[in-house]
Image (cartoon, helix red, strand yellow):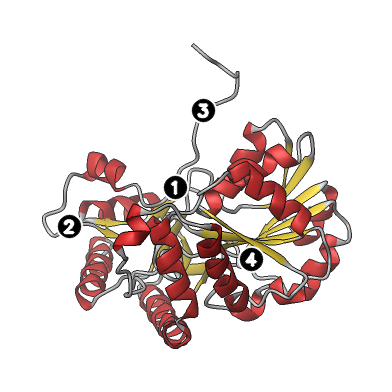
Amino acid sequence: MFDNGKSRNSPLHGGNLTAAKAEFGAPKEGWIDLSTGINPVCYPRTEISEQSLRMLPTPGDVEILTNAARDYYCVENEGAIIAAPGTQSVLQNLPQLYPDRKIAILSPTYSEHGHTWESAGNEIFRAEEFEALSIGDVAVLVNPNNPDGRRYSPEDIVRLAEKVELLIVDEAFCDASPDLSVVPHLKSSNILVLRSIGKFFGLAGLRLGFVIGDAGITDALRDQLGPWSVSGPAIEIGERALLDIAWIAEMQKTLAVQSTKLNDLLSAHALTIVGGTELFTLIETEEAQAIYKTFGRAGILLRRFEDQPNWLRIGLPGVKSEWQRFEAVLNAIDNMGE
């Protein structure tokens, strides 16, 4: 049997309802998954044509999609952009282009950044402060950060890029705060930006993302991903979503309101908020594990953390009944403490 000698332990992720069902059973009212930070309101125009299923995507189809993405992400003419089958696939391939590097990752953050680089045999330095990222050959920054929502200005990011060989900026949660994006400020050839359709548009199952940066890097990544890496349905729905400016603007307003509602509710129940974005809130409490289990038994999945046992990340409930179930569990937890 093939064995490369590397650990196969995968990081813990949100959204694993299979594991949740094994741990808590199947809830009578169904699961409410608040563990992922995915918009509970999916982009609605998801109908697809028969051709997108029956035919292989053409280079022209992909170009139409990337042109829509270029406009949406404000990519300047000198910037290159490629589509990918989700940014996770990009994380799997990037280490092959930059082997034997020291990788500095602003931490704690999305665990796959460290996991993919470390699995490829690179030395990992987990930086607790932004300035410490300059110690790496390659620096990795999630902005706004997952899970604590730390934010960094495009000007600071551009200055950091001058000190490293490559700066990777993961902007998966940037759609609701577009002023944070470094894309309109790209002047350096060593900044690579990752964007995702999954979070803000609520289309995680579509598996569609984009890479923006220097053509030399994006072309190499495109070669790694191979032909037809993005499906016909992803191209069709992704283009439609990126061009729907009215829906995007309304959703940005909606998420701001819903995020405030969630934070106010958590604060009203004396839970300490330590960060977040418009799509999730991070709380810290010594009762985190007990709260996680109480919600789980009620059919509501939160995101716990192996390395931070006092943290819980909580996504936005969706329809009114989900908010009611969520608040009912908070009330029950308060009553247990009396």
Residue labelled with disc 3: 8
- Residue type at numbered disc 1: His
The CA distance from mark 3 to mark 4 is 28 Å
| Residue situated in front as seen by the camera: 179 or 184 | 184
- Residue type at numbered disc 4: Asn
Q: Mark 1 vs mark 3: which is more N-terminal?
A: 3
Q: Mark 2 vs mark 4: which is more N-terminal?
A: 2
Number of other residues with Cα within 10 Å of mark 4, as a class: few under 14, some 14 to 19, many 20 or more: many
Q: Mark 4 vs mark 1: which is more N-terminal?
A: 1
Residue 294 sits in quarter: bottom left
Q: Are marks 3 and 4 in contact (CB under 8 Å)?
A: no
Position of 293 compared to 116: left or right?
Answer: left
Position of 293 compared to 115: left or right?
Answer: left
Residue labelled with disc 1: 13
| Residue situated in front as seen by the camera: 263 or 114 | 114
Rendered image: mark on residue 30: 2
Seen in the picture, residue 204 relative to 243 is either above or below; the reply is above
The CA distance from mark 2 to mark 3 is 32 Å
The CA distance from mark 2 to mark 4 is 33 Å
Q: Mark 1 vs mark 2: which is more N-terminal?
A: 1
Seen in the picture, residue 180 relative to 330 is either above or below; the reply is below
Q: How many marks?
A: 4
- Residue type at numbered disc 3: Arg
